[in-house]
Image (spheres, helix red, strand yellow):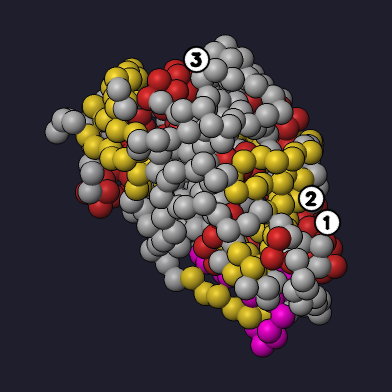
Amino acid sequence: MRSLRIWIPLLCTAVLAAGAGFRFLLPEDGDEERPISVGTTDVVGGLDPAGSYDTGSWALYSNLYQSLLTLRPGSAAPVPDAAESCRFLDPALTTYACTLREGLTFADGRPLTAQDVRYSFERMLGIATDIGPASLFAGLDSVSARGRTVTFGLRDRDATFPLKLATGAGAIVDRTRYPAKGLRPGAVDGSGPYRLAAYTPGLRALLEPNPRYRGVVGVPRGSVEVRYFEDEEQLAAAWRRGDVEVAHRQLPSQLTSSLDPSEEDVRMTEAVGAEIRTVVFDLRADSPLARRQVRQAIAVLVDRGRLTSRIHHSTVEPLYSLIPRGLTGHTTSFFDRYFRDDDATARARAMLHDAAVRTPVTFTYGHRAGRSFAAEAAELRRQLEATGLFKVRIVSAEWKQFQKGYAGGAYDAYGLGWVPDFPDPDNFTSPLVGRANALHNTYASPRVDRLISLTQRHGDRRKAAGVFREIQDQIAVDVPVLPLWQKKDYVLAGPDVAGSEHLSDGTGVWRLWRLSRM
């Protein structure tokens, strides 16, 4: 996804008491009715599930809309939500059916039917916006509805299909309110645990419990106000002032790395995350990075250790593969191929010389606006330009403009975070390097596509580990993307808020309904 969603099920979570010199007031009369304030720097691309494939949007979708399936905290196995039951109908794993719960309605009282589910998927695939989630369901061939049952026909065997249904791409919309051929701006009609009571783009979203919700998580106990900040420094300042009671994504690395576990004012949940940062390369014929040897030379030169320690204060860890640690198939393909105990500059120079590439290679690097993004881009430029082999022009843009830019080929390379939509290695292969991928860099490899298809045939994901390693070895050769780091996930909460440890766990679900006042 897009800066895209933190993985706890296979790794330990630590809930620490920590303080940074700020205080929260004790609850007063009526505080139980006051919305819990949650601060984030995530940007909401849009409220229509057919048009956005980004972390900020999907965080809201998981609270405002229902999908047929969802994921419980700490589990990689989807469970029914809008559905009563779901299962594959054939051993080939190409036909999947779900039966809806009885009595489902949207927040306004209109019945939610199997026809709404069918419409939601056909609409999303028909609109297929450049920055939408249609690529996640590239293998979906047909959707039919009969009674309370929805049946999906898949082009190929896909054991991961239930996980995809549990994402924001599987959000169910009201077919009477969402146009078939265009996006609907500025309104939400869903059946999730919350309804959207107020919304100001870029500033706030007020979520109130939806008493008509019928699903696995139950009706929330109270309201939540999500407050959006332009950058991590503004979020940190709001946290220090006590303007927000919960802070998540993205906090300055200086703040999270300096918190004192001996204090009791604040709880910090820390987990090894599955969020990764990559450099994406434009492979179009006229790009200065179109030739594989140029991208391989960059892979030789980038020093992840300096990025993680100098820029991110060790709140992230170097990553040498497309699939992060903690997931089946993780390997160190880029380290194995490009790391040597020798002069990296000399080796990169020889690679470019042998390929008859004239140096310095000049290219444009794009990144999302923000202090940490800019610092990372500057460090990458410093590392590459210090060799004399590259000249880098940095361009920044606000998130929505940045999305349009990379989707339209405005950058020769760009930095992109990826937060998994669901806890499976497939989510780091299909949408990033498969056919019709979400990166818009024109990369296509018949061998990689064939290997991805092979991984999707195994319900037991451990049996696909070897094939995932093959995919990553091939990506290390082709270098359509360059993995940089894997992020630790931090959630800060004030002493009066319970449930913050369940807010995020890498499954792509932002569980605001788990927050409550003590």
* Quarter of the image with the C terminus in it: bottom right
How many neighbours does mark 1 have within 10 angstroms: few (below 14), some (14-19), or many (20 or more)? some
Earlier along the polypeptide chain: callout 3 or callout 2? 3
Q: Nearer the viewer, residue 400 or 296?
A: 400
Check whether the beta carbons of the residues at disc 1 and disc 2 lie within 8 A of each other.
Answer: yes
How many neighbours does mark 3 have within 10 angstroms: few (below 14), some (14-19), or many (20 or more)? some
Q: Is residue 31 above or below residue 504?
A: below
Q: Quadrant of residue 165?
A: top left
Disc 2 marks which residue? 229
What residue is rendered at 40% in x and 20% in y?
115
Residue 89 image offset from top left, x and y in percent: 18, 31
Task: Tally the marks.
Answer: 3
Disc marking residue 234 = 1
Decide if residue 281 is on the left or right side of residue 332.
right
Q: Is residue 283 above or below residue 415?
A: above
SS at circle 2 = loop
Q: Quadrant of residue 151?
A: top left
Residue 80 image offset from top left, x and y in percent: 35, 44
Magenta residues (range): 253-273
Decide if residue 158 is on the left or right side of residue 255.
left
Q: Is residue 341 magenta?
A: no
The amino acid at mark 3 is Gly
Residue 196 image offset from top left, x and y in percent: 66, 40
What residue is rendered at 53% in x and 32% in y?
109
Disc 3 marks which residue? 126
The amino acid at mark 1 is Gln
What residue is rendered at 68% in x and 79% in y?
18
Distance in Å between CA atoms under marks 1 and 2:
6 Å
Taking the view exactly as shown, the residue that stands out farthest to the left is 91
The amino acid at mark 2 is Phe
